């Protein structure tokens, strides 16, 4: 299983919903997926390939809003998985299905030197806060949470996806940010997190280019096997 940049995907020619790898003879299923799904879908892809010999899964991971924009500009993909249902709706794709949920979390350096544990803490003067941009699913959810809590934040930067938020905090370029519980788990101690247990995003998947393989992959994400894998990475089942 290989991951390729979105720019490269535009050059891939598709046959019957999947491209063909002339070197190996394998068919390729291209999945555009939210960056917060990177670790879990990499694992899911291996299981799917094992169950479907001769088929390779290739991913393009980015902010959900960026992936939808690429699709509208003609970038080829077989499946789209977004980090919220609103962004999926903006794609215009029919028959999308929710396959998981992800809780938001306040993230800090492992030692949390500024003792940031609540949304109200994020409004303290002098703190360097990083958020995802307003069109990014985690950024939209973060702003809604802050507004509901009556907290005003002036971010030092607005990132294009959740990975950017985690990176800024991990590198010490921000004191805190809002990402997902799964990002804290994937960081393996590089950042600490406080779960915002009442706030979650629903992840949706849809077929972009109809084929047996694309339908099989979306069905797989709703399967008991996939749900177990998602849970092991910190995702919740659909509500």
Image (cartoon, rainbow, N blue to C red):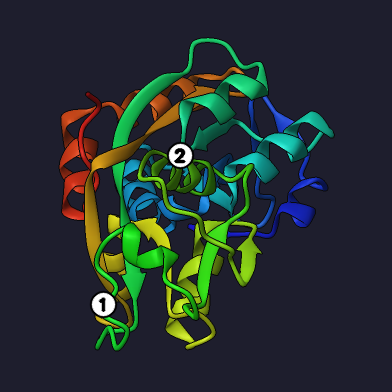
Query: Mark 2 or mark 1, which has the lower sequence index?
Result: 2
* Image-based side of 25 in relation to 165, left or right: right
Q: Residue at x 34, y 69 (%)?
A: 107
Task: Check the image and report above or below for 113 versus 31.
Answer: below
Q: In which quarter of the view is residue 223 placed?
A: top left
Using the image, determine if residue 192 lies above or below residue 96.
below
Which mark identifies residue 90?
Answer: none
The answer to whether marks 2 and 1 mark residues whose Cβ atoms lie closer than 8 Å is no
The label number, if any, that marks residue 188 in the structure image: 1
User: Gap in Å between the C-alphas at discs 2 and 1?
Assistant: 28 Å
Residue 15 higher or lower than 108, as above or below: above
Name the secondary structure under disc 1: loop
Residue labelled with disc 2: 144
- Of badges 2 and 1, the one in the foreground is 2
Q: Does 152 sit left or right of 110 as displayed?
A: right
What residue lies at 57% left-to-right and 11% top-to-bottom?
94
Q: Is residue 236 visible?
A: yes
Viewport quadrant of the C terminus: top left
Residue shown at 53% from the left, 49% from the top: 139
Nearest the viewer among 133 and 237 is 133
Q: Position of residue 88 (x, y in %)?
A: 56, 26
Q: Position of residue 149 (x, y in %)?
A: 35, 45
Q: Quadrant of residue 195?
A: bottom left
Relative depth, front residue between 114 and 84: 114
Question: On the rendered structure, is 2 left or right of 19?
Answer: left
Q: Position of residue 176 (x, y in %)?
A: 41, 73
């Amino acid at each position: 299983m290989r991951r390729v940049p979105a720019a490269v995907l535009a050059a891939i020619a598709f046959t019957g919903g999947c491209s063909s790898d002339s070197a190996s003879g394998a068919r390729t299923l291209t999945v555009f997926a939210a960056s917060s799904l990177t670790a879990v879908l990499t694992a899911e892809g291996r299981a799917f390939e094992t169950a479907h010999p001769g088929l390779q899964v290739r991913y393009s991971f980015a902010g959900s809003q960026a992936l939808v924009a690429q699709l509208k500009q003609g970038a080829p993909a077989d499946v789209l998985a977004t980090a919220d249902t609103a962004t999926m709706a903006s794609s215009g794709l029919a028959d999308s299905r929710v396959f998981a949920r992800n809780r938001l979390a306040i993230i800090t350096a492992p030692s949390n030197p500024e003792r940031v544990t609540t949304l109200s803490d994020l409004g303290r003067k002098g703190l360097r806060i990083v958020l995802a941009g307003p069109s990014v699913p985690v950024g939209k959810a973060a702003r809604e949470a802050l507004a509901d809590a009556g907290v005003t934040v002036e971010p030092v930067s607005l990132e294009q996806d959740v990975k950017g938020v985690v990176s800024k905090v991990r590198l010490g370029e921000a004191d805190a940010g809002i990402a997902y519980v799964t990002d804290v788990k994937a960081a393996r101690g590089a950042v600490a997190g406080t779960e915002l247990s009442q706030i979650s995003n629903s992840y949706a998947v849809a077929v972009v280019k109809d084929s047996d393989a694309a339908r099989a992959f979306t069905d797989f994400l709703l399967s008991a096997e996939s749900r177990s894998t998602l849970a092991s990475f910190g995702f919740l089942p659909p509500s």
